[in-house]
Structures are given as C-alpha cells and as structure tokens.
Image (spheres, rainbow, N blue to C red):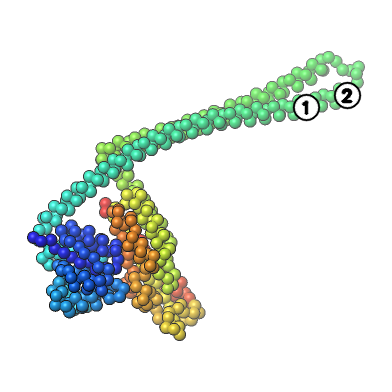
C-alpha cells in the first residue's frame, strides 16, 4: 500500500512538529504549511490524503482556507480536520458547515487521533501501530536504563569524592582549631601572669616602703616570694585546664561530624546498591525526589506569572523565563509536556476617542463601565498573544527539537479563562474591580511528565 500523505497547516512550529510526531507513528508522510495562503499554493501542485487546519493564523484564517479548498474541484474531496485550541458546539458546527470533517484539540490523545485516521481509511491495522509503539517503548526504556546507569555511576563517584573532601576538611579544621586554642591560651596566660606579677611587685614595694627597717624580717621576704610564685602557677593551671576542656569539646564535635559523614556514606551506598538492582525503596526515593523537583520548578514558575493590562502574555520577558526553565528541565532529564496557558482578567474599561480600550477611572461605579472584558480578547489584531521574539523562539529553540520536551502555548478568551480570584458581591467601584481583574490576568504553567 502506498504511503499516505498529510498536510499540517499551522503558524506554530511547535504545534506542527508535535502533530507530525504522532502522525509518523502511523506511517503517514507529513508536509507543512505555515499559513492558509501557503497551503493553497502547495495544493496547486501536490496531492495529499488529509489536511489538518489550524484556525487562528495571520492573513487567511482556517475557515477561509477551508472554504477555498472546498471551492476548488481538484481539492474539494480531500478531508479537512480542524486542528485547533477552540472548542464548543458552535465552533464545531461552523467548521462542518464549511466542509471540515471534524475538530481535533491541540492536545489530542494518540487514541483519538488513531480512531479518526481509521474512520478516514488512512490506517487499517491497529495491531501494527501497537507493535510499533511497543518497539518504540522498549527502545526508550532501554535508553532510559542506560542513562540511569550512567547517572548512578556519576552519583557513586560524586559521593566518594564528597566523602573524601569532608574527611580532609574535618581533619584540617581539627588541627587548625587545636592550634588556635593552644596559642590563644598561652598568650592569655602570659599576659595575665605578667599583669599579676607587676601588681604584686608594686604592692610589695609599697609595703616595704611603709614598714620600718627594724621590723622587716627575712621570713616576710620569703613569704612574699612564695605568694608571687604560687599565684601565677595556679592561674596557669586553671587556664590550661580550660584549654583542655575546649580541646576535648572540639574533638567530640569532630567525632560527631565523622559519625554523620559515615551515616551519609552508608545511606549513599545503600541507595546505590538498590539503584543497581533496580528495585527497592531506593528507586522510589529517587523517583520521589525527581517528582518533588519538578513540582518545585512548576511552583516557582507560577509565583511571578501575571502580566499587565493590555500587555502581551507571551512577550520578550517571557522568552527569557521560558528559555531558562527549558534549560533546567533538560538538565534534569525531563521527558514530557510543558503547557503555558494565558488566562485573561475581566477589566472595567472605557473607550477613548480613538476607539481604543483603557482602564476606567477608579472612582466611577462599576455599572458605568463601557465594557467588562480584556483588550486582548476584544482586539483581534493581538493574534495569539505572542511577541515576535516569542514566536521566533518557539520556531527555533533547540531544546524543543532535540529533547523529549513538548511545548503547548494557549491563550484563553475572556469567557473560558479560569478565575483564580472571584469578584465579591459588594464590589462597587472600578478601582476595586480592576485590582481583582489584575490578579486573574496571568500565565499558568503546567509540567506533565510522561512517567
């Protein structure tokens, strides 16, 4: 049987590549067109068996392209499937009225895609597709096992290096601490002894001068000398005793640190052993840490996810954030989907003299707003909410074409955007209303691992 051909018409490179990967699993040859006009030009000289048509594209949109295809006798019989993020019975009815055979969502599941291809007669053997997927799964599992073995060896080497480094550091710290304590105590004892000796000499000299010569005896001089000798020795003994106690405490801390290092090394060896066997709680703990890391990255990305009134949700600043996130995900071996969804806040707006939208005066009542909505939804010229730099990034980012990361970018309309914060019934002014709308004006990120 000759290989079937499909034409994917979408201005998003990421969406084209994602659909191509799924279609190639069923032995379909896939061609691309980035706009409705390009699709019409392609069909003048090429023949395909099915067309997947996006709706929102610059220039000729999906509905206009479908109408042109169905109006041409050479292409009228080619089945056209709308492949879009738009939903609803009204949209499906419009698409079928223009000649489309149905509507598939951008995040279509492989099973639903297969059923559609089966109905169109483009695939016949479900078992062959299952065998291909089984072979692909086995190859992927083997590659993952090999990568996991390499990571385990790296962790083992890193653990040994860390343990040796900690041991050397503890030894150096112990020697340095002991030397510092002894030197400090010697210096302190010397200074105290010198000060006491000086004071006692001064007191003895004053006593000698105050005592008449005829009452001085040899025993008084001897007693004074004994006192001057015994007191410094007693002080030195006390100081060295304190130094010995500090040294013993430092040795105890050092021993505790060594015990902690030994326990960590034992835990690392246990995890490594379980990892090499591929079973046991070690595997579960590693998987748990991986899931916690992914969840933490998703939470951090959603902490600063709002965009301002009339600003593009996917602007140049979002490019930098997305590039850093994808690089980090690739670094930890993430395999799955990254979903960016822009939800639009419903603002209280007024219309200016030029017909544009601006935020209403904060003091006016909500009932006097010209429109409750969002300028991105009302202004069709804003397209898909992406700046030129963001669109170029989606088309050329190497981590999207060289890794297992699939990226979906979606902007919801005012009606299907999810509210994170609801409007209380007692909101009366435009300022209060717009503060809540600004909180709902955001980009939500979801990380969906395949495993």
Residue furthest to the left? 1
Is 51 in front, or is 48?
48
The secondary structure type at the circle numbered 2 is helix
- Left or right? Give the position of 234 relative to 400: right
Of 341 and 260, the residue lying toward us: 341
Residue at image location 16% in from the left, 64% down from the top: 5
Q: Quadrant of residue 193?
A: top right
Residue 325 seen by the camera: yes
Q: Quadrant of residue 51?
A: bottom left
Few, some or many residues within 10 Å of mark 2 (<14, 14–19, 20+) = few
Residue at left offset 38%, top offset 56%: 325
Q: Going by the image, does 387 lie left or right of 231?
A: left
Classify 302 as above or below 349.
above
Q: Report the quarter where the N terminus lies.
A: bottom left
The residue tagged 1 is: 198
N-term mark: 2 or 1 = 1
Residue 397: percent from left, percent from top: 34, 58
Is residue 115 rendered to the left or right of residue 374? Answer: left
Q: How far apart are marks 2 and 1 (CA)?
A: 17 Å
Using a 10 Å C-alpha cutoff, classify the residue at mark 1 as few (fewer than 14 neighbours), some (14 to 19) or many (20 or more): few
Q: Residue furthest front?
A: 45
Q: Residue 209 carries which label?
A: 2
Determine the image quadrant of residue 356.
Answer: bottom left
Q: Where is residue 43 in the image (x, y as percent from the top left)?
A: 19, 71
Asked if 41 appears above or below 272 in the picture, the reply is below
């Amino acid at each position: 049987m000759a290989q079937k051909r499909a034409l994917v018409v979408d201005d998003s490179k990421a969406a084209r590549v994602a659909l191509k990967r799924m279609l190639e699993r069923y032995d379909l040859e896939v061609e691309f067109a980035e706009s409705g006009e390009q699709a019409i030009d392609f069909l003048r000289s090429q023949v395909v068996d099915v067309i997947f048509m996006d709706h929102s594209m610059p220039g000729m949109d999906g509905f206009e392209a479908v109408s042109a295809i169905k109006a041409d006798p050479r292409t009228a019989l080619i089945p056209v499937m709308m492949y879009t993020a738009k939903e609803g019975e009204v949209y499906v009815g419009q698409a079928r009225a223009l000649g489309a055979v149905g509507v598939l969502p951008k995040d279509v599941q492989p099973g639903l895609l297969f059923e559609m291809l089966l109905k169109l007669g483009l695939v016949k053997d479900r078992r062959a597709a299952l065998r291909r997927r089984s072979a692909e799964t086995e190859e992927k599992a083997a590659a993952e096992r090999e990568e996991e073995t390499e990571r385990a060896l790296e962790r083992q080497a890193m653990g040994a290096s860390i343990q040796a480094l900690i041991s050397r550091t503890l030894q150096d710290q112990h020697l340095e601490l002991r030397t510092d304590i002894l030197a400090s105590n010697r210096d302190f004892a010397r200074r105290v002894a010198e000060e006491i000796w000086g004071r006692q000499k001064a007191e003895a000299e004053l006593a000698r001068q105050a005592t008449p010569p005829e009452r001085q005896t040899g025993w008084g001089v001897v007693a004074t000398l004994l006192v001057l000798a015994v007191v410094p020795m007693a002080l030195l003994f006390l100081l060295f005793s304190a130094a010995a106690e500090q040294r013993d405490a430092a040795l105890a801390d050092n021993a505790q640190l060594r015990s902690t290092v030994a326990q960590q090394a034992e835990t690392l060896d246990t995890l490594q052993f379980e990892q090499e066997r591929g079973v046991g709680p070690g595997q579960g703990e590693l998987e748990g840490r991986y899931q916690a890391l992914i969840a933490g990255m998703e939470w951090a990305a959603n902490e600063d996810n709002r965009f301002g009134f009339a600003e593009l949700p996917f602007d140049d600043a979002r490019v930098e954030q997305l590039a850093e996130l994808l690089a980090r995900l690739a670094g930890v071996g993430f395999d799955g989907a990254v979903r960016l969804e822009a939800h639009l806040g419903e603002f209280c707006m007024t219309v200016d003299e030029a017909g544009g939208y601006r935020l209403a005066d904060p003091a006016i009542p909500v009932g006097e707003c010209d429109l409750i909505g969002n300028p991105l939804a009302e202004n069709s010229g804003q397209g898909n909410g992406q700046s030129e730099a963001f669109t170029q990034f989606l088309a050329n980012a190497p981590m999207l074409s060289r890794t297992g990361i699939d990226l979906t970018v979606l902007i919801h309309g005012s009606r299907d955007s999810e509210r994170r914060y609801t409007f209380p019934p007692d909101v009366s002014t435009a300022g209060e209303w717009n503060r809540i709308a600004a909180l709902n004006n955001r980009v939500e990120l979801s990380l969906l691992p395949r495993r």
